[in-house]
Image (cartoon, rainbow, N blue to C red):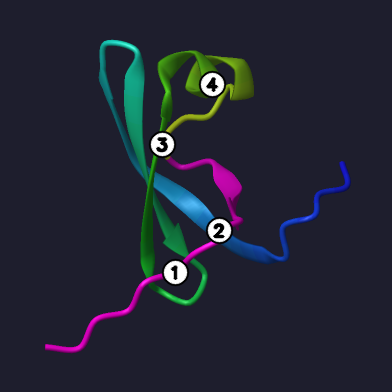
């Protein structure tokens, strides 16, 4: 599938926590970082993802904020 997003992080699903229609998916990247995505529970089911699965976190953002206190 072709996507316009250029930021892709390979990783492994560490946990999936569902709460009603939303799910929090935590992915550990191959570089050891953790990325958490909030997606719909139906998307988790449609994608068929489970803990331990190898996935890609695809990031597309029009704005990224960085703060240094």
Q: Nearer the viewer, mark 2 or mark 4?
A: 2
Q: Which disc number belongs to residue 51? A: 3
Residue furthest to the left in view is 69
**Most common SS among magenta residues:** loop
- Relative depth, front residue between 28 and 52: 28
Tag 1, which secondary structure? loop
Where in the figure is residue 45, as x and y percent of width and height? 52, 15
Q: Which disc number belongs to residue 64? A: 1
Q: Nearer the viewer, mark 4 or mark 1?
A: 1
**Magenta extent:** 52-69
CA separation in Å, label 3 and label 1:
28 Å
Q: Earlier in the sequence, mark 4 or mark 1?
A: 4
The residue wearing badge 2 is: 61
Q: Earlier in the sequence, mark 4 or mark 3?
A: 4
Residue furthest to the bottom in view is 68
The residue wearing badge 4 is: 43
Label 4 environment density (alpha carbons within 10 Å; few <14, some 14–19, many ≥20):
few
CA separation in Å, label 1 and label 2:
7 Å
User: Horizontally, is 5 left or right of 54 in the view?
Assistant: right
**Tag 3–tag 1 contact (CB < 8 Å):** no
Q: In the figure, 39 relative to 57: above or below? A: above
Residue furthest to the right in view is 2
- Residue found 49% across the figure and 52% down from its top: 12
Q: Earlier in the sequence, mark 2 or mark 4?
A: 4
**Tag 4–tag 1 contact (CB < 8 Å):** no
User: Horizontally, is 56 left or right of 30 in the view?
Assistant: right
Where in the figure is residue 64, as x and y percent of width and height? 44, 69
């Amino acid at each position: 599938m072709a996507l316009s997003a250029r930021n892709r992080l390979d990783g492994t699903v560490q946990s999936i926590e569902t709460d009603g229609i939303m799910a929090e998916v935590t992915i550990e990247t191959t570089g050891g970082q953790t990325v958490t995505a909030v997606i719909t529970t139906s998307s988790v089911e449609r994608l068929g993802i489970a803990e331990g699965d190898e996935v890609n976190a695809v990031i597309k953002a029009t704005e990224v904020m960085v703060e240094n206190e």
